[in-house]
């Protein structure tokens, strides 16, 4: 595994496409490098074989432009923030040496999503411990952790304008056709089938975009405060 600037960690293949792929594409255009870690292989999905899922995840990686995409096998729909999983993930973080890590937001409908947030945070912390009993890599702690909050109703800490990347974001999502093509039933009224999901993501990105005066944006939460250096050039008009 090569070292990269940004590492995304999410529960299922397709999570990062839905929540933050526009931001990732934007950062790649700025010259930063990216790696993707999927904690599970999405094997509880009712459609698509393992091989098709692997092909889809790789196709989406290529659309986004990540250096690597690794799919761990920590158990779809039974992900736990165990010590074993924490150490396994800490080893990946040591090898990839990211400056910034993007995790799912820490509340969610799917237990894997909020578990991935906890597990990811604890692994980032553990990766910096000198005496951690793991073999790979040197101690490393990412400087920044962002939580991609598209899946949950929460006031974001900041929004990123992804307008020029929105079409490619949809292209990346559509790589996961086997999961979502056709007339799948809605999971619930609040969590719709695929055709409606594209509509929902589009609506959400538009909504967040309009809050900062652009066409499309993605939301993020950080636990710590954001620092501002210059109050004259701040973006987004107040009046
Ligand atoms: Zn998911």
Image (spheres, grey):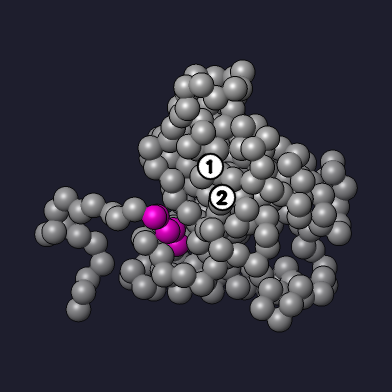
Q: Main secondary structure of the magenta part?
A: strand
Residue 64 occupies quadrant: top right
Residue lying at the far bottom of the rendered structure: 189
Residue 187 occupies quadrant: bottom right
Residue lying at the far left of the rendered structure: 232
Q: Which mark is residue 8?
A: none
The residue range painted magenta reads 219-223
Mark 1 is surrounded, within 10 Å at the Cα level, by few (under 14), some (14 to 19) or many (20 or more) other residues, namely: some
Pointer 1: what residue? 122
Residue 220 horizontal/vertical position (percent): 44, 58
- Residue at 82 percent of width and 71 percent of height: 184
- Please indicate whether residue 103 sits to the left or right of residue 51 in the image: left
Pointer 2: what residue? 118
Residue 78 horizontal/vertical position (percent): 76, 52
Is 222 magenta? The answer is yes
Rendered view: 105 above or below 203 = above
Residue 2 horizontal/vertical position (percent): 55, 23
127 or 102, which is in the foreground?
Answer: 127
- Please indicate whether residue 117 sits to the left or right of residue 197 in the image: left
- Residue at 20 percent of width and 53 percent of height: 228
Considering the image in quadrants, where does the N terminus appear?
Answer: top right
- Residue at 63 percent of width and 56 percent of height: 113
Given contact means CB atoms under 8 Å apart, are the residues at marks 2 and 1 in contact?
Answer: yes
Rendered view: 97 above or below 187 = above
Res 15 seen here: no
Residue 202 horizontal/vertical position (percent): 56, 69
- Please indicate whether residue 35 sits to the left or right of residue 44 in the image: left
Mark 2 is surrounded, within 10 Å at the Cα level, by few (under 14), some (14 to 19) or many (20 or more) other residues, namely: some
Rendered view: 96 above or below 30 = above
């Amino acid at each position: 595994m090569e070292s990269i600037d940004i590492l995304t960690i999410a529960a299922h293949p397709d999570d990062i496409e839905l929540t933050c792929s526009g931001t990732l594409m934007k950062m790649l255009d700025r010259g930063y490098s990216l790696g993707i870690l999927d904690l599970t292989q999405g094997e509880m999905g009712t459609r698509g074989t393992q091989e098709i899922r692997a092909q889809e995840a790789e196709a989406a990686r290529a659309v986004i432009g990540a250096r690597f995409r690794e799919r761990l096998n920590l158990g779809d729909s039974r992900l736990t923030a165990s010590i074993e999983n924490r150490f396994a993930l800490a080893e990946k973080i040591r090898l990839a040496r990211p400056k910034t890590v993007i995790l799912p937001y820490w509340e969610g409908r799917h237990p894997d999503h909020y578990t991935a947030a906890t597990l990811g945070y604890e692994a980032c912390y553990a990766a910096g411990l000198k005496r951690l009993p793991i073999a790979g890599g040197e101690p490393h702690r990412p400087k920044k952790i962002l939580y991609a909050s598209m899946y949950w109703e929460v006031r974001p800490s900041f929004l990123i304008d992804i307008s020029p990347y929105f079409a490619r974001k949809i292209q990346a999502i559509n790589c996961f056709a086997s999961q979502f093509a056709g007339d799948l039933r809605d999971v619930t009224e609040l969590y719709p089938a695929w055709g409606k999901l594209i509509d929902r993501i589009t609506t959400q990105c538009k909504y967040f975009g309009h809050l900062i005066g652009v066409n499309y944006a993605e939301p993020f939460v950080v636990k710590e405060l954001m620092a501002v250096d210059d109050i004259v050039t701040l973006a987004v008009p107040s009046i």
